[in-house]
Image (tube, grey):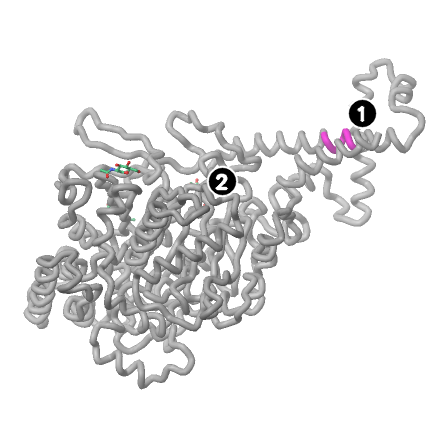
Amino acid sequence: MMLISHLILGLISTIIIPTTWALPPKFEFDGPESQRKYLVTNLPGLYDNLTPDQIPLMFAGQIELHPENHTYYFFWKFSDRNRIAENHKRTIFWLNGGPGCSSMDGALMEIGPLRVGKHGKLAYNNGSWHRLGDIIFIDQPVGTGFSYGDKLLKELTQVGDYLLTFMKKYFEIFPEERDNEIYFAGESYAGQYIPYIANGILDFNENLPEGEKPYNFKGVMIGNGWVSPNQQSLSYFPFFVDHGLIKTDNPKWGAILNQVETCQRLVDEADAHWNDPTVSPAEVNFGPCDAILNLLLANTGDGQCINMYDYTLRDTYPSCGMNWPPDLANVTPYLQDDAVMHALNLLNFEKWRECSLSVTRSFTAKNSFPAVHLLPRLTEQIQVMFFNGDRDIICNSKSTLSFLDKLEWGGAKGFTDGSEENNIDWIYDEKEVGYIKSERNITFVNIYNASHMVPFDVPDTSRALIDLITRNYDEVVSPETNKTSYVTYPLGVRAGGSNQNNSTSTTVSDTEPTSHKITRLIQLIVICVLVWGIYVLYSSYRSRPASIIRRTTTRSTAPGKKKNVQWADQLHQYEDEDQGHNDKDEGLLSKAYHKLTGTSHDGRGHYAPAQSEEYIEDIELGEGIIGDEHISDDFIIASDDEEGESGEERGDDKSGNGKGNVSRDVSN
Ligand SMILES: *[C@@H]1O[C@H](CO)[C@@H](O)[C@H](O)[C@H]1NC(C)=O
Ligand SMILES: *[C@@H]1O[C@H](CO)[C@@H](O)[C@H](O)[C@H]1NC(C)=O
Ligand SMILES: CC(=O)N[C@H]1CO[C@H](CO)[C@@H](O)[C@@H]1O
């Protein structure tokens, strides 16, 4: 008897609870205590606007790396609680740039499932990458975002070492993921960090410490990356000319040309000593090259300033895009909220800033080669992807192609098939969203209608980059033009529908047609009702000595039918009880429906558009952005000015040695 009742209760809890009732704020997590202490449950705003399906499983906190100098790295991890088949044993670490800018940009404005609207209102990002792998955002190096420590880092090799220590500690907490396929993704100045980290992982794998096993490291994805800084600076002038942003009658035309020539000479010199550390290791940034963009921005834009992260937008001078994207105005107060900091399990309550000026200043990388030098080695073992939003100026597509053209990897120089006609079209969701070049383990993707922060502008498309790097696409050659396309699909839609049923998800995928959703919903409801019925039937059987069978035989000549009625009676009885303390006119089915969809009568959750209207309004440049705090002299990231750093110090950067500019250039 006990066994049967346990069985039935077990059935109910396995079928119903995980899919419908495991709703926060009390959702169940039965992992080990070591993970539980990083669990994120009561994040403010989480249950107001998202459906239960959309709420990810989250962990966050500050992990101790080096007790001797009190170094802690903050991470925030998002996993899908309703994994689809394509999301299998994949871990993606994400880093933003700067140096010194927090990866919470990536989490809350780019690839993460949560976006922050006005007044801390959260909305679901329909293009979140967590549907295709666990995503972990790491604030680094020391002093960035919620990460802290006594010793600020200066060099790129240190970034690699610290990150490897982080990975070791991370996988001690989540050992079941140690064999996952590992990718590193990031943006901007992370184009310097990521190759160094990748290099560190390959070193680790090749010289395994005793008792360790290699990481299952698969690839890197660098968005609008700052990989070969000086070379990339040479692209600004042609970019402005090509896009009609500067004309030959500009009064500074000659001066700008001179600046470009000075930079060109420095680059030529550095190229002549490529990889010779005795000559010029200190070439991560040459001031004269860095100055080109400042000159261009200061002398174009007709009274306004061109937004350096999206040339189609305008901003005030000297901000020129620094208070962009507009979500920043919502994200900053959100992360500075005490309740949010508590929910993120912080040990240290330093106020969050998007970028840390002291990190930027400390991180000179004076003795580091630019990351471009490491690429040839990486391509021997992993996939290396560069993706560029084509509206970005700072780290534009042309600049990425220019360093790839000069680079030797995999036994040849540049893309051997470099002509534009031979670009591969990228089709996503039946639209041409960009073009691709891919040879010898380097893939370059140019993405149309996207800025420096690609996933901010085209979230769904950006997620499909994972399909490109994992080769989950169809290669199609047009019979007429002989042109090749790589075709990728929205979630749940695969070529010929062959994988349609591979979904292990127990809930409704957000990309299914509505009719499928309804069918699934009905199936689920029927299962719930049936199980419920069995349970209710069983409890009535237990509570009444006179068995159901006897009752049915006395009442009806058709016992089968009678049974159904009995079930229905019992259900009504339950319903009546329930209504005693709930909405009088809400039926059981509608309740079940509300549970499934999250539209329960307590007002928690309903289907939300991916972006709330307020959110879209916000995209108007400049609206809702706090002026003074963000706007600084000479593009320094003043919003991020630490307490104790005086305006005088900021003034120093104004002298324009290019250092302050670095922080601005690649801040996102
Ligand atoms: C590309 O990477 C794979 C491992 O992913 C490796 O086996 C192969 O040799 C690499 N190709 C080249 C040209 O380096
Ligand atoms: C989510 O994205 C899919 C395509 O991937 C789209 O069909 C669907 O309408 C989107 N949902 C919302 C709420 O925007
Ligand atoms: C809406 C929009 O700006 N669409 C553009 C996206 O990019 C392609 C290719 O550059 C343009 O043709 C579209 O007009």
Seen at 46% across and 28% down, the residue is 500
Main SS, magenta region, reads: helix
Ranked by sequence position, the earlier of labels 1 and 2 is 2
**Picture coordinates of residue 403, whole percent (x, y):** 17, 52
Residue at (73, 38) in percent of width and height? 588
Relative to 660, is 127 on the left or the right?
Answer: right
The answer to whether residue 68 of the structure is visible from this angle is yes
Disc 1 is placed on an element classified as helix
- Labels 1, 2: front one: 2
Q: Which residues are magenta?
A: 531-535
Above or below residue 186? Residue 217 is above
* Amino acid type of the residue that numbered disc 2 sits on in the rendered structure: Asp
Ligand 2 resides in the quarter of the picture at top left
Q: Is mark 2 within 8 Å of ligand 2?
A: yes
Residue 128 at x, y percent in the picture: 44, 48
Position above or below: 150 against 515: below
In the picture of the structure, the residue carrying the numbered disc 1 is: 565
**Place of residue 187 in the rendered image (x, y in percent of width and height, measured from the top left):** 32, 56
Left or right side of 534 for 142: left
Residue 141 numbered mark, or none: none
Whether residue 525 appears in magenta in the rendering, the answer is: no
Would residue 325 be found to the left or right of residue 391 on screen? right
* Residue at the far front in the pictured view: 210
In percent of width and height, residue 297 lies at 20, 68
Q: Tell me the CA gap for discs 1 and 2.
A: 36 Å
The residue under the point 32% across, 65% down is 99
Q: Quick one: 131 or 193, which is closer to the camera?
A: 193
